[in-house]
Amino acid sequence: MPLDKAKIRQSFSAASVTYDGVAELQRTVGYALLNTVDSHITGTLLDIGCGTGFLTAELLRFNPELLIALDIALPMLHVTRDRRWVKTTPTLLCADAEYLPLINSSVNHVFSNLALQWCSNLVAVFTDIKRLLKPDGQLIFSTFAPQTLQELKAAWCSVDDYSHVNDFYNAEQLKDFLQQAGFTHINITSTLYTPHYESVFALMRELKHIGAHNVRAKRNKHCTTKTAMQRMIAAYETAHAINGNIPASFEVFMVIAS
């Protein structure tokens, strides 16, 4: 799934100011992710795709010796930098998750909350993470799964043949990618979150404010017309509206690999 890396960087840079105000799902998933792991985690922790530093701050509960917050968007790291850090100030690293500038066997645990779906080559990403992990290290991450935004995708499919919504890998694909990278112990669980919104516009506004645009390299290069947008909204509401609100599915995989 080729993704436009410049578009990803631009989208999340623009969302750095609005992200925390609308990222309720990301926080919910982040807490759930941390609750899946052993409380005795120590050593060097790396947070890939740290965004505004929510998960980075929560990782302090493990009392790490070194905490590294990495993100592709420099404005996101600026927000992380300006948080109130009491016990440990993280080391900030502006880098692409597909090109990790860390030495071999230097990290005990890698965390990532709803970020790795923005990488094109997950085999390369997982291989690089395996390289920098210590022999007993773990990769612990959450990522969007195929049912995510299925209602929005179906509504757009009734309007045109363009790809308006990103696709996401299934569990078997993720497991295969991890095994190719050298991980042998892999646990994947799935949870479906279905928040409701007052309108389709409210859903799309939230997606914009967290930087979750369609970032495929091969997307519709033309502006979506007002008529096409109205047809999509009508299709969405006709199929899914409940008491004036519309649901949106977000399927999330929780993965622990070593």
Image: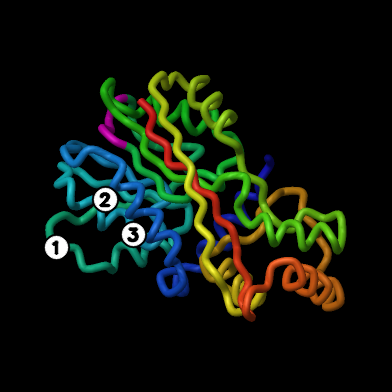
Mark nearer the N terminus (2 vs 1):
1
In front of the other: label 2 or label 3?
3
Q: Position of residue 147 (x, y in %)?
A: 62, 49
Mark 3: secondary structure? loop
Do callouts 3 and 1 mark residues in contact (Cβ within 8 Å)? no
Q: Quadrant of residue 257?
A: top left
Q: Which residue is mark 3?
A: 53
Q: Which residues are magenta?
A: 105-109
- Above or below residue 201? Residue 215 is above
Q: Is residue 217 visible?
A: yes
Q: Which residue is mark 2?
A: 91
In front of the other: label 2 or label 1?
1
| Alpha carbons under labels 2 and 1: distance apart | 14 Å
Q: Quadrant of residue 220?
A: bottom right
| Alpha carbons under labels 2 and 3: distance apart | 11 Å
Q: How is the image coloured?
A: rainbow
Q: Residues within 10 Å of mark 1 (few under 14, many from 20)?
A: few
